[in-house]
């Protein structure tokens, strides 16, 4: 299981299928985070299609141990079927669902703050779902006197950094000169 | 939104809640201040209890516009929770942030 560090939060990216074969490994990975001093774990379910009973059991076991150790675990980007499974198991009371969209947008803003010199204004950040594809759209204004090649270079750098950090299918950076509706 | 003017400095009282709905108002107000020819702005966040990503976006954009206008923008009075959000977004290294309004006045070049 892939673990990313964002700020002081460990983001555990769950696999497409959380079944018996993977369950024990996932539990161990989560407990290892806590054992090595990680206090905040965000479970990213954006890729997860199936959670089998064994998977659910492993997650609950890990959660109890994490709470005992004084850590926190939150869930994000759950697909409706998976979320329903957790609700049916009566776990919606225990789990704190993270505000997915806000967390994502703050990550985008953090990256834009890091690249502050490379654009002239920020007109909006939108999270859109096109069919199954989750897309982040970032509306940036660039210096009018810059060559297209330079703009392209900055745009590629920002996009590459964000693609690595965000659990989305696509990062779009769109040049814009005015505020964008709804963003 | 309330704003006051003390000498060459404009002080803008930021809303209690800066979210998707209200952030546009903050954006328009800050733009107006630059357009009126002001070059020194203090954003007083002492009343602000909540800021969403939309609010953060407005501040990042406002900083860009202050630089474009050749102005200087200083934030003050951030409550610990708000400061933590600014910190989380990597904004604290980018913005000039003071504890009190008086400190902000002294920071102007």
Image (cartoon, rainbow, N blue to C red):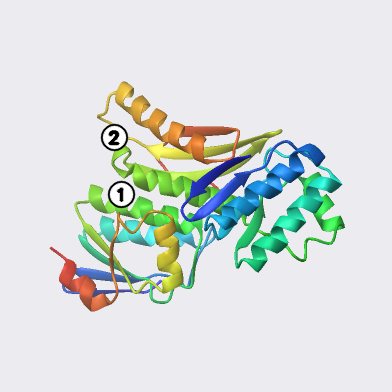
> What residue appears at the point 42 percent right and 76 percent down from the top-left corner?
B47
A48 and A126: which is toward the camera: A48
Q: Secondary structure at mark 2?
A: loop
A165 and B28: which is toward the camera: A165
Q: Give the answer, above or below, for where A98 lies relative to A114.
A: below
Residue most toward the left?
B109
Q: Is residue A180 visible?
A: no
> What residue appears at the point 35 percent right and 31 percent down from the top-left corner?
A154
Q: Give the answer, above or below, for where A129 lies relative to B29.
A: above
Residue A4 x/y as whole percent: 53, 44
> Label 2 near label 1: C-beta < 8 Å?
no
Q: Chain of mark 1?
A: B
Q: Give the answer, above or below, for where A45 lies relative to A89.
A: above
Judging by the rendered image, the residue that carries numbered circle 2 is A143
Q: Is residue B51 visible?
A: yes
Horizontal placement of B88 versus A62: left or right? left
Q: Which mark is residue B106?
A: none
Answer yes or no: are tags 1 and 2 on the same subunit.
no
Residue B19 x/y as whole percent: 52, 62
> What distance separates the C-alpha of mark 1 from that of mark 2?
12 Å
Judging by the rendered image, the residue that carries numbered circle 1 is B64
A177 and B51: which is toward the camera: B51
> What residue appears at the point 17 percent right and 68 percent down from the top-left corner?
B107
> What residue appears at the point 30 percent right and 49 percent down from the top-left corner?
B64
Q: Could you classify mark 1 by the number of other residues whose Cα lies within 10 Å: few (under 14), some (14-19), or many (20 or more)?
A: many
Residue B3 x/y as whole percent: 32, 73
Q: Secondary structure at mark 1?
A: helix
Horizontal placement of A35 versus B66: left or right? right
Horizontal placement of A111 versus A136: left or right? left
State which quadrant residue A66 falls in: bottom right
In which quadrant of the rendered image does the N terminus of chain A lie? top right
């Amino acid at each position: 299981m892939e673990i990313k560090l964002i700020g002081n939060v460990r983001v555990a990216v769950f696999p497409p299928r959380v079944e018996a074969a993977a369950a024990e490994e996932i539990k161990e990975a989560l407990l290892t985070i806590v054992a090595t001093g990680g206090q905040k774990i965000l479970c990213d379910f954006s890729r997860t299609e199936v959670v089998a009973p064994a998977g659910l059991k492993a997650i609950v076991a890990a959660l109890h141990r994490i709470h005992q150790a004084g850590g926190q675990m939150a869930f994000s980007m759950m697909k409706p079927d998976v979320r329903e499974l957790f609700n049916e198991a009566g776990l919606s009371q225990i789990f704190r669902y993270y505000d997915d969209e806000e967390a994502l947008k703050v990550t985008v803003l953090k990256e834009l703050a890091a690249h502050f010199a490379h654009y002239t204004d920020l007109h909006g950040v939108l999270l859109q779902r096109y069919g199954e594809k989750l897309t982040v759209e970032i509306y940036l204004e660039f210096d009018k006197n810059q060559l297209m090649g330079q703009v392209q270079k900055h745009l590629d750098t920002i996009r590459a950094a964000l693609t690595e950090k965000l659990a989305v299918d696509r990062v779009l950076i769109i040049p814009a000169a005015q505020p964008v509706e709804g963003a | 939104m309330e704003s006051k003017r003390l000498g060459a400095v404009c002080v803008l009282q930021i809303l209690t809640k800066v979210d998707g709905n209200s952030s546009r108002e903050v954006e328009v107000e800050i733009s107006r201040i630059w357009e009126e020819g002001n070059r020194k702005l203090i954003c007083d966040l002492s009343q602000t209890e909540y800021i969403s990503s939309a609010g953060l976006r407005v501040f990042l954009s406002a900083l860009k516009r202050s630089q474009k206008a050749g102005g200087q923008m200083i934030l003050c009075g951030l409550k610990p929770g708000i400061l933590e959000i600014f910190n989380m977004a990597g904004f604290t290294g980018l913005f000039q942030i003071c504890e009190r309004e008086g400190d902000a006045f002294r920071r102007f070049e």
